[in-house]
Image (spheres, grey):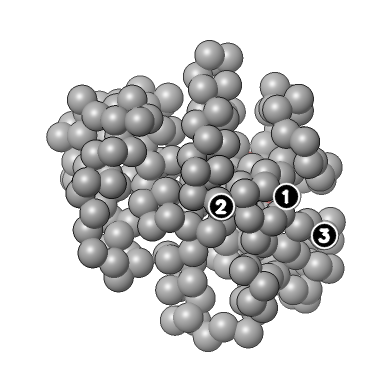
Amino acid sequence: MISSNNLRFAYPSGKSFTFPDIHCDDSETLLILGQSGRGKTTFLHLLALLLKPESGRILVQNQDVMRLSASETVRMRARNMGIIYQKPHFVGALSVLDNILLANYLAGAQQDMQKAVQLATHLGFADHLSKKTTQLSQGEQQRVSIARALMNNPNVILADEPTSNLDDANCYRVIELLREQSAAIGASLVVVTHDQRLKDEFLNQVLL
Ligand SMILES: Nc1ncnc2c1ncn2[C@@H]1O[C@H](COP(=O)(O)OP(=O)(O)OP(=O)(O)O)[C@@H](O)[C@H]1O
């Protein structure tokens, strides 16, 4: 589960935000909708513990993560959170497979080749595992991002605009995969987006 209360944040430039409280239980989904510039990525980066709020509280698996030290925060993120960034941030020199296995390495876990191949097969890019990520289409890269985010069976999956550059067919396919995969491991799935196509796809929604 993940929840936030009274989160406030300000960039050094002065732009400041007060975010609505959210709560997403294990196996539940939450859509955070907002137009461009409303602070969706900022909110997701706060939930992902990549930014520190001015005030407020974030609970992950009922643990107050604001109390963690810097190294505990890094460990908590790597082991318990699967993050699908707006831009995938792959390591260009590595193969698709090694980019996925990197998630295990960063979490200090054993590399699970079998799981990587299983996910790639399920997500439909097993034929591309030895390619470089730049050789893949945007839709394929999005699916690689999802596989990477799932490698450590996270408690929480956070996805930033996972469908924004995809055509309708790929948009619904990616959302279905995200929902299906997070349900399979009992994770909370939080999606931030401006993509109005997702409005009817999620029961729980918050507007920014
Ligand atoms: N590092 C930063 N320093 C200063 N201001 C920033 C920084 N990052 C974002 N902002 C500002 O904060 C506001 C919200 O940005 P954010 O990326 O969170 O919005 P968003 O809703 O995700 O937008 P989009 O849908 O266009 O990606 C914008 O006005 C942006 O210019």
Quadrant containing the C terminus in the rendered view: top right
Comparing labels 1 and 2, the label whose residue is closer to the camera = 2
Instruction: Please name the residue shown 36% across and 51% down the image.
Output: 151
Q: Which residue is mark 1?
A: 39
Does residue 10 appear in the picture of this structure?
no
Relative to 2, say whether 149 is above or below.
above
The answer to which of marks 2 and 3 sits earlier in the sequence is 3
Comparing labels 2 and 3, the label whose residue is closer to the camera = 2
Q: Label 2 amino acid?
A: Ala
Q: Label 3 amino acid?
A: Asp
Residue 187 is labelled as: 2
Quadrant containing the N terminus in the rendered view: bottom right
Marks 1 and 3 in Cβ contact (< 8 Å): no
Q: Position of residue 7 (x, y in %)?
A: 78, 67
Disc 2 packing (10 Å; few <14; some 14–19; many ≥20): many
Disc 3 packing (10 Å; few <14; some 14–19; many ≥20): some
Q: Position of residue 83 (x, y in %)?
A: 50, 52
Instruction: Please name the residue shown 30% across and 70% down the image.
Output: 108
Which element is circle 2 on?
loop
Residue 106 is labelled as: none
Side of 5 relative to 87 (left or right): right
Side of 28 relative to 77 (left or right): right
Q: Label 1 amino acid?
A: Gly
Instruction: Please name the residue shown 48% across and 40% down the image.
Output: 181
Instruction: Please name the residue shown 49% across and 49% down the image.
Output: 185
Q: Which residue is mark 3?
A: 21
The answer to which of marks 1 and 3 sits earlier in the sequence is 3
Q: Which quarter of the figure has residue 47?
A: bottom right
